[in-house]
Image (tube, rainbow, N blue to C red):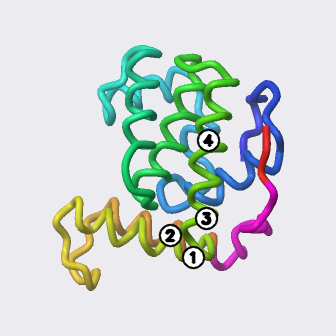
Amino acid sequence: ILRNWKAPKLPAALYAWACAATGPLVGGEGWYESEPWEARQGLADWWDIRSGEDAAATVSELLRGPVTAWSRVRAIHVAIAACRCELLGPEWTWQAVLHAARELQQSYPSFDAIASDYLRARREWARLPVDGTADDAQQRGCVARVAALQKRRWDGVPFDAFLHV
């Protein structure tokens, strides 16, 4: 979890929950522990996000429509990464993260279920066979991160934790 960066006014329970939920994508680390310039570069390279307006629009778009692990995990990830590099303010970020987290809690029974649906959707997005027989390197990384989090019991984060800001 983040060692060198402290998010203003971030409740520890919400941050821990967000790290567990985004586990398939980043394993609880990734941009959350990176230098701000690395987060900014990753957002530009992978999401074409270069401003706060781009970041807010991307997160808002991911929060529209049906609740899926694919959309909400990525919304949480982009919001925290954008806050990390100061494209989004902490108050806006934590409200977006809280919104996505509560929707996930209402729509899935566990972190395992979120991870399973995320992995399925990523295979679909990458046009990989659903059975995992031809996973690309990124998918194998996601699968490995989920397995590690499952082994660590999702770092002890209770799925049904009461989340607030």
Residue 136 x/y as whole percent: 25, 66
Residue 151 forms part of the magenta stretch: yes
* Label disc, if present, on residue 115 of the rendered structure: 2
Contact between marks 3 and 2 (CB within 8 A): the answer is: no
Q: Is residue 31 left or right of residue 5?
A: left
Q: Is residue 157 left or right of residue 56?
A: right
Picture residue at 21% right of the left edge, 77% below the top: 134
Picture residue at 45% right of the left edge, 47% below the top: 74
Q: CA distance from mark 1 to mark 3?
A: 14 Å
The quadrant the C terminus occupies is: top right
Residue 21 forms part of the magenta stretch: no
Q: CA distance from mark 4 to mark 2?
A: 17 Å
Residue located beneath label 1 in the image? 112
Where is 104 relative to 85, above or below? Answer: below
Could you tell me the amino acid type at mark 2?
Ala
Q: CA distance from mark 3 to mark 2?
A: 15 Å
Closest to the camera, between mark 4 and mark 3, is 3
Q: Mark 1 or mark 4: name the one nearer the start of the chain.
A: 4
Contact between marks 4 and 2 (CB within 8 A): the answer is: no
